Amino acid sequence: MDQREQLCELGHSLYQRGLTHGSTGNLSVRLNDGTIAVTPTGVSLGRLTPENLSILDANGDYLSGRKPTKEVPLHLAFYQTRGDRAGAIVHLHSCYATALSLIDAKETDDWLPHLTPYGIMQLGKVRLLPYYMPGSSAIGTAISGLAGRHAAVMLANHGPVVSAKTIEAATYAAEELEATAKLALLTRSLEPNALTPAQVHDLVRQFHVEWT
Ligand SMILES: [Zn+2]
């Protein structure tokens, strides 16, 4: 399966399982020739086809296909600051992560609670960014300002943005972020037994997690 087909298949799966809704959310992948395939504006992730993706050059300039999502700046910011650690980006308007951002809204470098090992292993520290108007170039500027230190950010009142080497890995990491946010909300009033700093440290060392 080529990268574009894989992106569409994962988009369908995310949509079918309610991880983003309507025509929200957008995905992109850096193709082997260095161009970027990104989901088009106004098209549900449940209805993607390889033919209706937008193709951009490495600077984000339009090359072919449908008109791209207005959230291109947040994709470019990851590609331009994380080098080959960012081969694909997943941005969702997922419910639990967004809900948690309404409650734990203080800007921080380590927003997602340390509840499960996979949350640590797949995401590293998730940076919370404040609310910005969707499509605003300020989102790209804010992500660029992190200088590539975070694989994943949470846009308050909006949704997560997750980068990884492949579209599959970025999708799985975005799912992990949502699952961890759900656990955090479900256990919020129950004094959850989070991983200890020593347990987190062991995971970071064992699995070479970026933890800066
Ligand atoms: Zn969005």
Image (tube, helix red, strand yellow):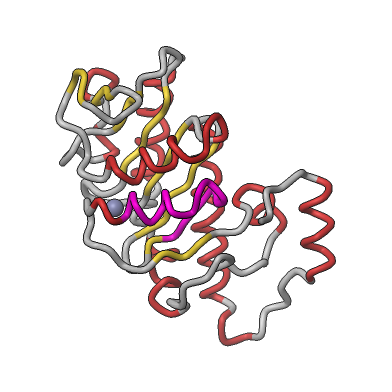
x then y, percent, for residue 183: 57, 68
Was residue 149 drawn as part of the magenta stretch in this picture? yes
Which residue is pictured at 51% across the width and 61% down the height? 127
Quadrant position of the C terminus in the picture: bottom right
x then y, percent, for residue 122: 63, 47
| Magenta part of the chain | 139-154
Pick the residue in front: 7 or 36.
36
Q: Is residue 160 above or below residue 64?
A: below
Q: Is residue 20 above or below residue 166?
A: below
x then y, percent, for residue 7: 40, 28
Where, by quadrant of the figure, is residue 61 drawn? Answer: top left
Q: Is residue 193 shown left or right of residue 65?
A: right
Pick the residue in front: 122 or 134.
134
Q: Is residue 178 shown left or right of residue 26?
A: right
Q: Is residue 137 shown left or right of residue 162?
A: left
x then y, percent, for residue 30: 42, 25
Was residue 204 drawn as part of the magenta stretch in this picture? no
Where, by quadrant of the figure, is residue 134 drawn? Answer: bottom left
Count of picture labels: 0
Which residue is pictured at 27% across the width and 22% down the height? 55
Q: Is residue 199 above or below residue 88?
A: below
Q: Is residue 115 above or below residue 144?
A: below
Which residue is pictured at 77% across the width and 52% down the height? 204
Which residue is pictured at 84% across the width and 66% down the height? 198
